[in-house]
């Protein structure tokens, strides 16, 4: 696909889990994505952006996956005739145990959906095993996949089978004592009776099979998107889950006593801890010296995985390659430290404090070292990405050297219009660098409709922040604020035109902003049940059928044509 920055394009961001179809099992999957690609293509969008698609853990956060490469099983479309050995009889047997109508209502019930999909995959695997035992050639594709992906797949499958031994919990430091380290776990397995070893190996093989099916389906959807003239944009978080197969299996490459995050950020008014101390994401720090000694093979595997399924990928918190803010405690202790003063905190940590790693930017020498090392790591990412284009999420507290560095590497950064303010002036879209991605919101932010409602409420810090953001968006869009402005009639067309009119290579609209809705997919710093579970009100076909939405999308297409993005 021609995705050169010379041609301006537009896209839509939609979390896969949020999409609906008439027959889905309570979560958006690859059938929903196929329909959504058709819908987006008809409007004129050239990009469909997704959140990370790696297998999630107990908190269901796509940014906290239990593997940096393995794909999330609930994304798979599992029905008779899909790329899995699933018969109608087996499908009906599993589905009969679930009230699908209830499962589809409201938010994603992650645990129930996962149980259903794993049940379907187990039926498919049993059929595959029976068939392949009679026909060696039938298993050849699976065997070839296992051989090709062995560098990450073996550790992942072993970890996943151990999870089952420990109540399906990924929290490896709370497992049976002999399971808490990979070496002792392998010794434990070797000491088990033959029947137990065979049972364990069979479960590991099942998880290899799941990943094979996942790779087949995701490869097919990438091809389908290409045929429709749509590029898929993926997402690679800079960090990796502490409770992941990666950290468990490659312990010496991670500094697990420290947690990466971001410094204090006043923007998130609904999170007092973030305003005081920063965001503690719980991701272990990288031991770059060890990784360099191995030619950064872990990063090469990770990038090699994502490039198979996407035409572009976004690196979440790309600044982490240069330096990352680190806490000397894990997130579970945040509330313990929240009320403390700086000195009280130091006493409790033995003198350690939250700080930038591997070094801060307090001197010119530190800045140069951070820039140089960050560029070295990112060159490896670019080398492994091949023809897949890379963009970097460079939002938050950004050192002066980061954006010029990214630009020199050919990595597009982000432009949030309401944050692009210099000397009190909102930067016009015409002044955006071509090598950039313009958007009003990411998955972490309130949709503009929600900001509009917030701005009309009683005076609070949140209301003041919403009014300030809307005022800046209005300036960016050339709107004269006045009483009686209607959001959909006066505000919506102007802000969409301004975004598309900008000089940025890509203009991305979050699905909630595109539809003029106020639903929020995630509130940073919280563990609310609504995070990562909110679904769209309508199915994809319902979007096509709605007269109101059809009219709105005709406007969007006209704006895309007018601004040269089609």
Image (cartoon, rainbow, N blue to C red):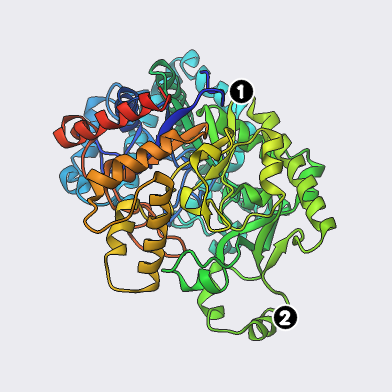
Q: Position of residue 566 (x, y in %)?
A: 40, 22
Q: Where is residue 331 in the image (x, y as percent from the top left)?
A: 54, 68
Q: Which of 61 and 88 is in front in this view?
A: 61
Structural crowding at the residue carrying mark 2, measured as other residues with C-alpha within 10 Å and reported as few (<14), some (14–19) or many (≥20): few
Q: Position of residue 88 (x, y in %)?
A: 23, 26
Residue extending furthest toward the right: 365
Horizontal side, residue 407 vs residue 413: left or right: right
Disc 2 target residue: 350
On the question of residue 426 being in view, the answer is: yes
For mark 1, give the secondary structure.
Answer: loop
Task: Identify which residue is drawn at 63% across, 29% down.
Answer: 385
Numbered badge on residue 387: 1
Q: Earlier in the sequence, mark 1 or mark 2?
A: 2
Structural crowding at the residue carrying mark 1, measured as other residues with C-alpha within 10 Å and reported as few (<14), some (14–19) or many (≥20): few
Q: Nearer the viewer, residue 223 or 1?
A: 1
Residue 199, compared with residue 390, is above or below; it is below
Q: Nearer the viewer, residue 393 or 435?
A: 435
Horizontal side, residue 529 vs residue 96: left or right: right
For mark 2, give the secondary structure.
Answer: loop
Task: Identify which residue is drawn at 45% across, 60% down.
Answer: 524
Residue 493, compared with residue 250, is above or below; it is above
Quadrant in which residue 175 is drawn: bottom right
How far apart are the alpha carbons under marks 1 and 2? 48 Å
Q: Position of residue 338 (x, y in %)?
A: 53, 79
Horizontal side, residue 38 vs residue 300: left or right: left
On the question of residue 92 being in view, the answer is: no
Quadrant in which residue 172 is drawn: bottom right
Residue 396, compared with residue 212, is above or below; it is below
Q: Which of 106 and 489 is in front in this view?
A: 489
Say how many tags the image has. 2
């Amino acid at each position: 696909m021609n995705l050169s920055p010379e041609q301006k394009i537009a896209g839509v961001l939609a979390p896969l889990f949020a999409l609906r179809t008439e027959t889905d099992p309570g979560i958006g999957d690859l059938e929903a994505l196929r329909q959504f690609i058709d819908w987006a293509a008809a409007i004129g969008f050239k990009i469909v952006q997704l959140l990370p698609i790696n297998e999630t853990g107990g908190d269901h956060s796509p940014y906290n996956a239990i593997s940096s490469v393995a794909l999330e099983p609930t994304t798979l479309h599992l029905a008779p005739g899909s790329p899995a050995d699933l018969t109608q009889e087996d499908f009906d047997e599993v589905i009969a145990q679930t009230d699908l109508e209830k499962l589809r209502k409201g938010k994603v019930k992650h645990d129930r959906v996962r149980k259903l999909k794993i049940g379907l995959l187990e039926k498919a695997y049993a059929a595959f095993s029976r068939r392949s035992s009679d026909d060696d050639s039938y298993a050849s594709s699976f065997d070839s996949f296992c051989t090709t992906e062995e560098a990450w797949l073996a550790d992942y499958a072993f970890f996943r089978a151990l999870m089952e031994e420990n109540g399906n919990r990924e929290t490896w430091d709370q497992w049976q004592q002999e399971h808490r380290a990979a070496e002792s776990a392998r010794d434990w397995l070797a000491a088990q009776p033959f029947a137990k070893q065979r049972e364990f190996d069979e479960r590991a093989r099942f998880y290899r099979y799941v990943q094979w099916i996942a790779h087949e389906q995701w490869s097919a959807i990438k091809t389908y998107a290409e045929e429709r003239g749509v590029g898929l944009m993926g997402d690679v978080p800079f960090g990796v889950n502490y409770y992941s197969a990666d950290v468990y299996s490659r312990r010496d490459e991670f500094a697990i006593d420290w947690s990466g995050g971001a410094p204090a950020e006043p923007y998130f008014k609904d999170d007092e801890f973030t305003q005081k101390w920063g965001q503690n994401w719980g991701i272990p720090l990288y031991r770059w010296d060890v990784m360099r000694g191995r030619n950064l093979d872990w990063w090469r595997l990770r990038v090699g995985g994502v490039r198979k399924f996407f035409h572009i990928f976004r690196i979440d918190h790309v600044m982490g390659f240069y330096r990352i803010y680190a806490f000397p405690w894990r997130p579970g202790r945040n509330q313990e430290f929240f009320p403390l003063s700086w000195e009280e905190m130091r006493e409790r940590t033995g003198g350690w404090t939250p700080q930038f790693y591997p070094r801060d930017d307090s001197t010119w020498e530190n800045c140069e070292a951070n820039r140089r090392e960050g560029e070295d790591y990112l060159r490896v990412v670019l080398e492994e990405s091949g023809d897949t284009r890379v963009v970097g999420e460079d939002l938050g507290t950004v050192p002066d050297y980061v954006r010029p560095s990214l630009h020199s590497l050919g990595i597009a950064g982000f432009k949030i219009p309401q944050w692009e303010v210099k000397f009190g002036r909102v930067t016009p879209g015409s002044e955006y660098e071509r090598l950039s991605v313009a958007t009003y919101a990411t998955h972490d932010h309130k949709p503009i409709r929600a900001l509009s409602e917030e701005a009309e409420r009683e005076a609070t810090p949140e209301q003041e922040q919403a009014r300030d953001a809307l005022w800046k968006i209005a300036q960016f869009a050339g709107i004269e604020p006045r009483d009686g402005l209607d959001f959909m009639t006066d505000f919506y067309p102007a802000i969409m035109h301004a975004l598309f009119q900008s000089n940025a290579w890509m203009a991305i609209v979050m699905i909630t902003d595109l539809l003029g809705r106020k639903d929020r997919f995630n509130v940073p710093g919280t563990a609310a049940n609504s995070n990562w579970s909110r679904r769209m009100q309508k199915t994809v076909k319902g979007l096509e059928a709605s007269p109101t939405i059809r009219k709105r999308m005709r406007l969007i297409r006209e704006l895309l044509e007018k601004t040269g993005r089609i």
